[in-house]
Amino acid sequence: MKTSVNRSRAGMGRYQPSSTAARQTLSLESTYAVAENCVCLHLQSAGRAVARNFDDVFRPLSLTSGQFAMMLTLHRAAPVTVGELAGHLAMDRSTATANLKPLERRNLVGSEPHHTDKRARLVALTADGRALLADAVELWAKGNDLVTQGLSESDVLTLCHTLRRIATNHEMKGRFAH
Amino acid sequence: MLNRPSPVTVGALAESLAMDQTTISANLKPLERRRLVSIRRAEADARVKHVVLTGAGRTLLAKAVKHWQVVNDSVKASINRVDLPSLYSSLATIAEAGR
């Protein structure tokens, strides 16, 4: 794709507007071409729509789509550390900690210090959490049908496969970049 | 989305990004603080806010597109060439159904 952009070397630090008069800007055609070809933009628009739909679906249980994903991830045989939970959800640890708080306040999630690593905390679903998750999964089926209603079964399979490939291919790169 | 000849309203921007207006207003604040966008009340209707990219905003956008190109190409490279049109069409169907 051809774009008319500034020829100067891209700065690595915080952006400072250049003082030279020869600033270049993006043409309108390039703007549309970027918007049309931007994987991120397409993913985010669909992601917001999906999250909003699931927020509506889980509302009777006072659960958001993000809280559901977190509880589903915690539904396993053994407790996990906050760091592991964050890794599974591709979130940073402070976001995971903040998102756990409302679940802990509602006694859906419990935590205890790690047996050997004193700085780490282990989190797990409580009995209340497991009961709520079972109700939520029934609603989830409804939400999932709603979100994918315009797609065939094979479209959904291909989509999930492609999304998983993007997530796994770019997870490592993302980690190295920070 | 803001790189266009005439200013857009906050409402129209929210619509084209499928976000609600409060999220858009919150997301515009850091850009406004960095003087990359400017927000003015419409002359015809004081309740309506117009958003435009500033000169600095347009310059930064042009630079950002070069970085965007690198990452977008690398994401696309991880997807089968055949799967890309199907990905876009599935995502568009989902985004449209969820409006």
Image (cartoon, grey):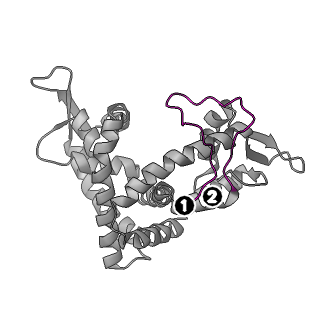
Label 2 belongs to which residue? A30
Is residue A19 toward the left or the right of residue B30 in the image?
right
Q: Amino acid at mark 1?
A: Met
- At x 36% / y 79%, what residue is drawn? A152
The quadrant in which residue A136 appears is bottom left
Vertical placement of residue B88 versus B44, above or below: below
Q: Residue furthest top?
A: A118
Label 1 belongs to which residue? A1
The magenta-colored residue range is: A1-27
The spot of residue A176 in percent (x, y) is: 31, 37
- At x 53% / y 32%, what residue is drawn? A11
Q: SS at mark 2?
A: helix
Task: Please tell me how many numbered marks the rendered image carries.
Answer: 2
* Crowd tier of the residue under label 1, counting other residues whose Cα lies within 10 Å: few below 14, some 14–19, many 20 or above: few
For the residues labelled 2 and 1, the Cα–Cα distance comes to: 8 Å
- Specify the principal SS of the magenta part: loop
